[in-house]
Image (cartoon, helix red, strand yellow):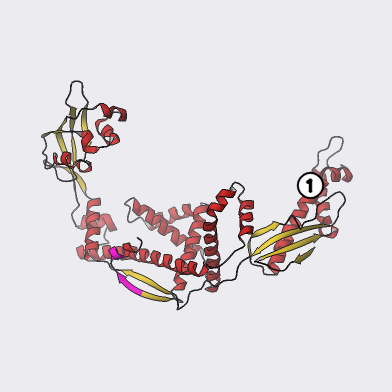
Amino acid sequence: MQINQSEVKDQMMVLTLTLEPQDYQDAVQKELKQIRQKANVPGFRPGMVPMGMIKKMYGKGVLAEVINKEIGTHLGKYMEEQKLNILGDPLPNEELTPALDMDTQDTFTFAFDVALAPEFDAKLNGKNKLTHYNITVTDEMVNNQINSYAERYGENVEVEQAQENDILKGTITEQKEGGVVKENAMFNPMYMKDEEQKALFKDVKKGDVVTFNPVKAYQSDVEVSSMLGIKKEEVANLSDSFTVEVQGIMHHQAAAIDAELFAKVYGENNIQDEADFRAHVKAEIEENMSEDSEYKFGLDVKAAIMKKMSKVSFPEAFLKRWVKATNEKMSEEEIERDFDKMLDELRWHLAKDQLMKHYNIQVEKEDVEDYAKKVAKMQFMQYGLMHVEDQFLTNYAQEMLKKEDQLRGIVERVAEQKVYAAVKDSAKIEEQSISHADFGKLFD
């Protein structure tokens, strides 16, 4: 096998491979012998088909398959030995590849276009100023979170007089002959769009009869049809006068700030008293704020690195060919539309790989599992499950990691976080305290 390398021009080179008979004949013969052993040809016993017939039937296909395999093997070995840092994969150069005739040739030459990765330095240093924000946790934030827990673990109780956000139950009757009657209707006046209609239910008592217009009140055919138990299309035929006899008022009563609430939030025997409860709540908020702070810092680090990478150029014509070759369903228009985004993703991928090598960053199995548990914990928190047992989180995370796309995404995220952490030791970082409100404005 002979491989020749052209001069590099605009990050491109051509690799020319020449295969002599000695490079492929043994592999072709071996494959044909295996086919002969299995061939089922009428008139011949298995394994007794003449080799000449096998060659005639399968020779060209086997030769093409062996040649393709040899090309891939030797191309990869050559690029590894020469330490070529390439973009994408080599693509055939049809202009420089001579026409093939497998009936008369025994020497074959193939040319491939190869794109080389650009030279760049993605590392940040003391000249790159970054801010790491420390979000201040206030008593108000702690109080709000405690109130949130109290609301979450509260209970619904029936009361005699309505307060804001209470749910009313009663019989709604349309004031016309043969009108709609809905028994045991339940609704919350707080969600009424019309303030005048909403005011009709202020301080209403059990047993009161209120006259109102549901269509005007909600201004939504879907909400009205749901409340009255009718079809959406029937809302247009309703009159403007309904009465509701209030038969029940349901009020959500927040839980008391006591040992029972402490146990529901943090488990039995984990909280001593209210002061300890507040300390736990504050620590929990600080942990969440720390994660938000690290997220923002990561965004800023990536932006600084991408700014350095913005002037890095690529052989764009080759990359578009490669994208088309590896994504046959993508049209030329789609490639053109998304190409700038693809280049940014490539810039970040190259920068991240360089930084991981520079800082000797490794993504270990434990790192991936720990991050998967964090993701699982956040998902449960979205459903109000604040303190899931560690073993359950571990099992959930393991199931998550069995899905290839989720595993790949988590590995990528862990690698990025390790890069951001390493940057802290090399770039100029200013620590700045900030309120939660002002921190939120940084994302506007």
- Identify the element where label 1 is drawn: helix
Residue farthest bottom in this picture: 126
Observer-nearest of 269 and 444: 444
Is the residue marked by circle 1 packed among few (<14), some (14-19), or many (20+) residues within 10 Å? few
Q: Pick the quarter of the image with the N terminus.
A: bottom right
Total tally of numbered discs in the picture: 1
The answer to whether 200 appears left or right of 96 in the picture is left
The answer to whether 54 appears left or right of 410 in the picture is right
The answer to whether residue 365 is above or below residue 48 is below
Q: Which residue is mark 1?
A: 61
Observer-nearest of 2 and 398: 2
Q: Position of residue 279 (x, y in %)?
A: 25, 66
Location of residue 290 (image quadrant): bottom left
Q: Position of residue 321 (x, y in %)?
A: 64, 55
The stretch drawn in magenta includes residue 226: no
The answer to whether residue 375 is above or below residue 239 is below
Observer-nearest of 97 and 404: 97
In magenta, the rendered stretch is 431-438
Specify whether residue 91 is in view. yes
The answer to whether residue 2 is above or below residue 127 is above
Q: Pick the quarter of the image with the C terminus.
A: bottom left
Location of residue 202 (image quadrant): top left
Residue at 67 percent of width and 68 percent of height:
84
Q: Position of residue 11 (x, y in %)?
A: 65, 66
Residue at 18 percent of width and 28 percent of height:
173
The answer to whether residue 283 is above or below residue 40 is below
Q: Position of residue 136 (x, y in %)?
A: 28, 68
Q: Amino acid at mark 1?
A: Gly
